[in-house]
Image (cartoon, rainbow, N blue to C red):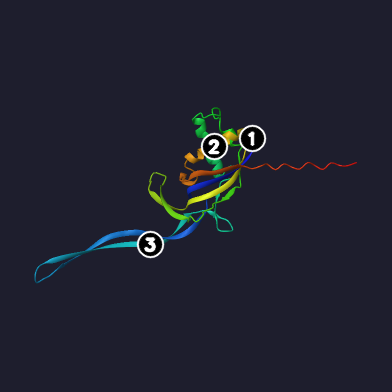
Amino acid sequence: MKLHVAMELMDVYGGDGETRVEQVTEKKLKRTRKTTRTRSDLGLSSEDSMDESKVDKVEREVQTFRKDAADVPMIRLGGAHGKLWGALLEAGKRMYALKAEGWSNSYRPFVEMIQISPVWVSMKLDGSPIEMRSMAQELGGPSGGMITILFDVVPKCLVEFDITYPDEMDSRARALLAQLEMMALFNKRRATASLKSLAVVPLVSKPPAPQKTL
């Protein structure tokens, strides 16, 4: 069976090796300078203070999205190990842990039967502009420390794709898709999903071979 799925995604972070360069302003130093003035004839003093900041303009990498020929951002949902397949595997793991109906024995063999296409899916923004956001990330190793990573983020978009699986597993496939609405998804586990429509796609059968006439 094949389903055509329309899904709304919110807060999708870029990445997957796709980067661009952005010039940003970084504050390096802030100090307060004080000046004291004393009148020699009266012996009175006054004090003025002034804040000074030093900023640098630097080029930074931004984790972004692949673009198609029309400059529309894309996300790698399909394929054997695309983002959606990984999310469905996590959904199956949760269903199995809860011993939900139809999931008491296993989950991975079924998820491995699912095929998702296309591999790269266009993100229909519908006027929602891409935002640049920063995220602090802790460095590994004994020294520790924090760095700031920049991301392009799609606040809201619509994606459409097809999933194919054995007919007898239809109810479980629909249960997995519904489970996605209760999970944090994709890059940095920041995206959320809302199913908009599911439609059965008729499988095209091959026409019968012409019979030879005597």
Structural distance between the alpha carbons of marks 3 and 1: 60 Å
**Who comes first in sequence, dot 2 or dot 3?**
3
- Residue 24 is situated, as x and y percent measured from the top left of the image, at 41, 60
Residue 114 versus residue 137 in the image, above or below:
above
Q: Amino acid at mark 1?
A: Asp
Label drawn at residue 54: none
The answer for how far apart the CA atoms under marks 1 and 2 are is: 15 Å
Callout 2 secondary element? helix
Of the pair 37 and 74, the residue shown nearer to us: 74
Horizontal arrangement in the rendering, residue 173 relative to residue 147 (left or right): right
Q: Is residue 38 left or right of residue 160?
A: left
Horizontal relation, residue 22 to residue 40: left or right: right
Instruction: Decide which of 121, 213 is in the foreground and name it.
Output: 213
Report the amino acid beneath label 3. Answer: Asp
Residue 176 percent coordinates (x, y): 54, 37
Q: Residues within 10 Å of mark 1 (few under 14, many from 20)?
A: few
Amino acid tagged 2: Leu
Q: Residue furthest bottom?
A: 41
Q: What residue is shown with label 3? A: 56
| Residue 123: percent from left, percent from top | 54, 52
The reply to whether dot 1 and dot 2 touch (C-beta < 8 Å) is no
> Element at badge 3?
strand
Q: Which residue is mark 1?
A: 167
Can you tell which of label 2 and label 3 is closer to the viewer?
2
Residue position marked by numbered label 2 in the rendering: 176
Of labels 3 and 1, earlier in sequence is 3
What residue lies at 38% left-to-right and 49% top-to-bottom?
Answer: 146
